[in-house]
Amino acid sequence: MISDSLLQGVYLFTDLSADQRASMARIAEAMTLPAKFSIFRAGDPATALYLIKDGSVRLAVIASTGQSIEVATLGSGSHFGEMALIDGAKRSATAETLEPTSMFRFDYDKVTALLDKSPATAAKLYRSMARFLSNRLRQTTTDMSYAREKNLRHF
């Protein structure tokens, strides 16, 4: 079972009360995966979000040239797969373990059922998700601006 201290230390769950975190812990499914294990691939239907306990996961996309481009390498305490909980879209990247990894899977149907039963939990979790995704969008904007600036210098 997932520990409260792990959940409390994760950005998405920090604002939840101990009881709300306990509700989330009850729906978490433990997974132990070997190195180079494909968790999901870009274009797959999205069914869960994940929290890494130990190990690391590489998120990558395939460029139009067919080249794999690393988007992020995530380690202990990181989460991924949360975007589709909000928009229901297919996976935008591929996720693969880089080493033996233990993590927790939060099935979207179970999360949604929990949030439907507890509007207070839903408000806190969605607010945390909005802040997280906002920060990610700011970083992406910075990265794109830098890349475009560098690209313009070559012309």
Image (cartoon, helix red, strand yellow):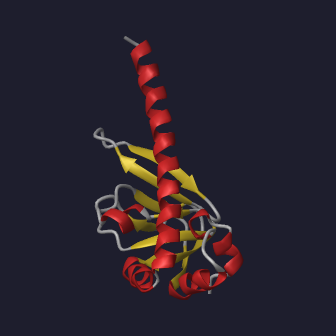
Q: Which of 85 and 92 is in front in this view?
A: 85
Residue 131, image x, y percentages: 52, 55
**Splitting the image into 4 quarters, where does residue 110 fall?**
bottom left
Residue at the spot 62% in from the left edge and 87% down from the top edge: 1
The percent position of residue 126, horizontal first and vertical second, equals: 46, 66
How many marks are shown on the rendered structure?
0
Determine the residue located farthest toward the right in the rendered image: 5
Q: At 65% from the left edge and 64% from the top edge, which residue is drawn?
A: 76
Task: Report x, y in % for residue 33.
Answer: 54, 74
Left or right: 56 in relation to 150: right
Residue at x 45%, y 70% (from the top left corner): 49
- What x and y, as percent, mark residue 114? 44, 84
Q: Nearer the viewer, residue 6 or 130?
A: 130
Relative to 7, is 66 on the left or the right? left
Residue beneath the point at 45% across and 21% down: 149
Residue 105 is at least partly visible in this image: no
